[in-house]
């Protein structure tokens, strides 16, 4: 039983919540109010899809609300009872980002994210697939007579799909195809096997095996001989290399001996030359002189470092003094310029004080106030006079002021007099306005000059302070200039001292270089004498080594050893070529042997495969026959079950006696729905029954299908079941639904625009309202 449905942003449902009960539940509302959307949502909530999605009439994103508000996600929650448990399914659709799903059992979360897994859990609990729910439980809008309206072949196909018979038929067709293919394969394999002579191939294989054995034994003997020859080659090569190496060593040492004798001769000449150069000079004297020069050089370096450091410090001090001289020079110049400016300001200030003062400003402001008041008075008088002139102009024979008699002549004179007086007032006003403008300008000028005078007085106050600063800066400038002269003098003296000591250091370095050269000559002479002694020793050693090596090869002929080696290598190559040819022959024989063995194995496997396929063909033919029998049996049992339910249901639903039963028949390979007349004759519902009878027959068929295919669910959803029914038929349908259907169905949902079906309600009833003209959303109103 479905307990609760919640929709958020689902098509035209912004936030709709509905509770349902057992019995007949009703959803009523005008077209476009969102009735069918509710049951699309129930189907989607349970199975993750609904018929319009399956038929591609709609896309998933189309169910997310677009009007009156465009939303990015929609949510469906279904709560239902099954197997004594409270189960809940929530599915959320995100625009362009797929869906999210969850499944709860008694409030506990069992599955999250996987939409497919949630659908599997729903199918397991309801024991009903999407196909059964969408075709049997859920009747789409105006589709109550769906199975009746189908064409003959299509009706059989659709019902077979519900029974899943089409899977057996596909399996039968596939097995027939497979049988034909296997029979062809067996024929092809038998033909292939018949093209080979098994016995001939076996005889050839035995002959090849014997040949391989013979060649292999001969090859083994040849390889043994080759091994012996190879050992001779190795020994001769080693002997040849040993004698050849000793001869080369003798030649190398003879060359070395000549080179040593040449070096000794050259060394004697060089020793005589060096002895002549250093005659009369001892190594001790040279070393002593070098130490003295080194000490003097070190002292000079230390002295020069001190003086250079002092010079660097003085130069930094001079740079600092010059920076300060530059700074104080700029400051003195700046202060003098400022003092000069102040003197000019003092002169200007005296001039301005003579012309402008606070008293003058007060006087001008007072005059401005007087003029402003006078102008206001004049303007009021002018206005009053103009009004009086206007009244006089329209007056007849009485004065509007004093009520005295007024002639045209008198009126004219009074008007002229008043106009003249007003002209004088306007003239005075104009002159006063000009004077006021001039006074305003003068006041602004006085204020500006007073402000400037204040600024000048502020500047003049700094004069004494600047005079003191000038005195201090000039004193600092004088001190720095004196210091500069003193430092420059010391720098010149230091430079002269450094130059003098650098010249002395240069002379010491030059003398040091000359002494170093003499010292190096003495060292070279001593070194040369030592090396000459070493070469004499090496000369004697080389002579001894030459004699020893000559004794080692005494009686050995290198050319004879080389000749024997070439002869044995030739034999080795001949044997290697012979072995290679034999191996190639053996390889060919082995390849042929493997080829024959492989072919015989393949043919043997093919013979076994043919035997196996013959057995498979027998099994397939049995399987095909079993599938055909199963299809017939399922149809017969299904029709028998449906007819059993329809016979009982019809008697409860149909209130009249003209048709006593309803049955589903199989005629000419198709399903036909028939009514049984009182006399026992069966007639087709299509073409005989009235609209009401037809609807009740279709409703009976739907209930029977539901009980036969989904007996544990006992739910029926009818969308607009009153299509093509007249008023009386609708009333009869309502009565049947209210009084009789609960015997077969636990819960029925009716979607309709016809409010008369409220009479059928035994559970909950809701009315859906929506302002389509303003793209409003669905309002859910509970009726009962």
Image (cartoon, rainbow, N blue to C red):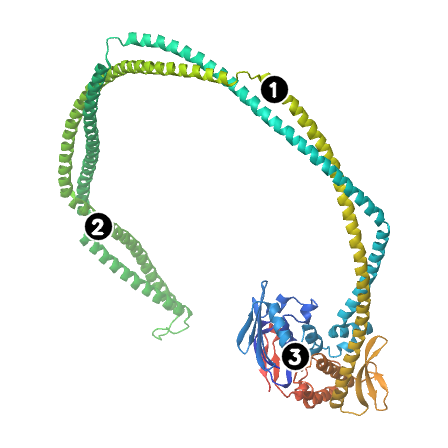
What is the C-alpha distance between the residues marked 3 and 2?
90 Å
Mark 2 lies on residue: 450
Residue 21 spot, x, y in % from top left: 60, 85
Residue 639 spot, x, y in % from top left: 78, 80
Crowding near the residue tagged with mark 2, few <14, some 14–19, many ≥20 C-alpha atoms within 10 Å: some
Residue 448's disc number: none
Sequence-first disc among 3 and 2: 3
Judging from the image, what secondary structure is the residue with disc 2 in?
Answer: helix
Sequence-first disc among 2 and 1: 2
Relative to 682, say whether 618 is above or below.
above
Q: Quadrant of the N terminus?
A: bottom right
Crowding near the residue tagged with mark 3, few <14, some 14–19, many ≥20 C-alpha atoms within 10 Å: some
Residue 493 spot, x, y in % from top left: 16, 22
Which quarter of the picture shows residue 558? Answer: top right
- Which numbered mark, 1 or 3, is in the foreground of this view? 1
- Look at 31% across and 10% down and name the residue there: 274
Relative to 355, say whether 31 is above or below.
below
Mark 1 lies on residue: 562
Residue 80 spot, x, y in % from top left: 59, 79
In screen coordinates, is 386 left or right of 26?
Answer: left
What is the C-alpha distance between the residues marked 2 and 1?
132 Å
Which quarter of the picture shows residue 635? Answer: bottom right
Which quarter of the picture shows residue 140? Answer: bottom right
Sequence-first disc among 1 and 3: 3
Mark 3 lies on residue: 30
What is the C-alpha distance between the residues marked 1 and 3?
120 Å
Judging from the image, what secondary structure is the residue with disc 3 in?
Answer: loop
- Between 30 and 388, the residue placed more toward the observer is 30
Judging from the image, what secondary structure is the residue with disc 1 in?
Answer: helix
């Amino acid at each position: 039983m479905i307990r609760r449905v919640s929709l958020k942003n689902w098509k035209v449902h912004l936030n709709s919540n509905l509770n349902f009960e057992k019995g007949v539940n009703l959803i009523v509302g005008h077209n476009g109010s969102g009735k069918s959307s509710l049951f699309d949502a129930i189907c989607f909530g349970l199975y993750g899809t609904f018929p319009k999605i399956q038929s591609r009439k709609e896309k998933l994103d189309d169910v997310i609300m677009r009007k009156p508000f465009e939303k990015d996600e929609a949510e469906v929650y279904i709560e239902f009872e099954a197997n004594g448990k409270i189960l809940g399914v929530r599915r959320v659709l995100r625009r362009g980002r797929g869906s999210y799903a969850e499944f709860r059992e008694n409030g506990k979360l069992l599955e999250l994210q996987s939409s497919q897994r949630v659908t599997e859990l729903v199918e397991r609990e309801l024991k009903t697939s999407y196909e059964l729910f969408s075709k049997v439980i859920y009747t789409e809008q105006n589709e109550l007579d769906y199975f009746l309206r189908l064409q003959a072949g299509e009706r059989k196909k659709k019902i077979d799909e519900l029974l899943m018979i089409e899977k057996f038929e596909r399996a039968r067709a596939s097995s027939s195809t497979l049988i034909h293919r296997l029979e062809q394969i067996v024929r092809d394999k038998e033909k292939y096997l018949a093209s080979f002579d098994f016995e001939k191939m076996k005889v050839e294989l035995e002959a090849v095996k014997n040949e391989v054995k013979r060649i292999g034994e001969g090859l083994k003997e040849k390889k043994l001989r080759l091994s012996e020859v190879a050992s001779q080659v190795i020994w001769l090569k080693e002997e040849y290399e040993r004698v050849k190496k000793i001869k080369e060593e003798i030649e190398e040492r003879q060359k070395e001996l000549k080179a040593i004798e040449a070096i000794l001769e050259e060394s004697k000449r060089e020793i005589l030359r060096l002895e002549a150069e250093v005659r009369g000079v001892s190594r001790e004297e040279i070393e002593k002189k070098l130490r003295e020069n080194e000490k003097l050089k070190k002292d000079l370096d230390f002295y020069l470092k001190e003086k250079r450091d002092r010079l660097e410090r003085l130069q930094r001090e001079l740079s600092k003094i010059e920076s300060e001289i530059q700074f104080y020079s700029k400051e003195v110049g700046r202060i003098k310029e400022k003092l000069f400016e102040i003197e000019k300001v003092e002169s200007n200030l005296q001039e301005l004080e003579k012309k402008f003062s606070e008293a003058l400003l007060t006087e001008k402001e007072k005059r401005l106030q007087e003029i402003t008041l006078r102008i206001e008075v004049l303007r009021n008088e002018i206005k009053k006079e103009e009004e009086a002139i206007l009244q006089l102009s329209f007056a007849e024979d009485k004065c509007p002021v004093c009520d005295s008699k007024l002639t045209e002549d008198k009126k004219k004179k009074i008007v002229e007099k008043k106009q003249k007086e007003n002209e004088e007032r306007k003239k005075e006003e104009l002159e006063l306005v000009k004077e006021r403008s001039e006074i305003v300008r003068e006041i602004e000028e006085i204020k500006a000059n007073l402000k400037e005078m204040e600024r000048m007085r502020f500047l003049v106050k700094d004069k004494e302070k600047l005079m003191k600063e000038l005195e201090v800066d000039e004193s600092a400038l004088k001190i720095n200039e004196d210091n500069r002269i003193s430092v420059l003098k010391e720098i010149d003296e230091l430079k002269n001292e450094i130059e003098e000591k650098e010249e002395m250091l240069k002379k010491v370095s030059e003398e040091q270089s000359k002494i170093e050269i003499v010292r190096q000559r003495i060292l070279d002479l001593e070194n040369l004498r030592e090396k000459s002694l070493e070469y004499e020793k090496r000369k004697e050693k080389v002579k001894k080594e030459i004699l020893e090596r000559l004794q080692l090869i005494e009686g050995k002929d290198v050319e004879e050893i080389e000749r024997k080696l070439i002869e044995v290598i030739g034999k080795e190559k001949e044997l290697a070529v012979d072995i290679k040819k034999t191996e190639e022959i053996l390889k060919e024989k082995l390849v042929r042997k493997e080829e024959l063995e492989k072919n015989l194995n393949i043919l043997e496997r093919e013979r076994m495969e043919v035997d196996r396929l013959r057995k498979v063909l027998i099994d397939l033919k049995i399987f095909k026959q079993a599938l055909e029998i199963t299809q017939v049996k399922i149809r017969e049992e299904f029709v028998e079950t449906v007819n059993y339910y329809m016979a009982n249901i019809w008697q409860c639903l149909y209130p009249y006696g003209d048709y006593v039963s309803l049955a589903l028949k199989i005629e000419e390979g198709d399903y036909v729905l028939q009514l049984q007349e009182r006399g026992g004759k069966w007639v087709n519902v299509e073409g005989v029954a009235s609209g009401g009878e037809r609807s009740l027959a279709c409703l009976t068929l739907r209930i029977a299908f539901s009980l036969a295919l989904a007996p544990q669910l006992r739910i029926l959803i009818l969308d607009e079941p009153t299509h093509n029914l007249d008023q009386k038929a609708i009333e009869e349908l309502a009565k049947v639904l209210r009084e009789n259907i609960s015997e077969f169905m636990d819960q029925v949902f009716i979607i309709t625009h016809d409010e008369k079906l409220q009479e059928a309600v035994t559970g909950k009833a809701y009315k859906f309202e929506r302002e389509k003209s303003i793209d409003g959303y669905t309002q859910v109103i509970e009726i009962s």
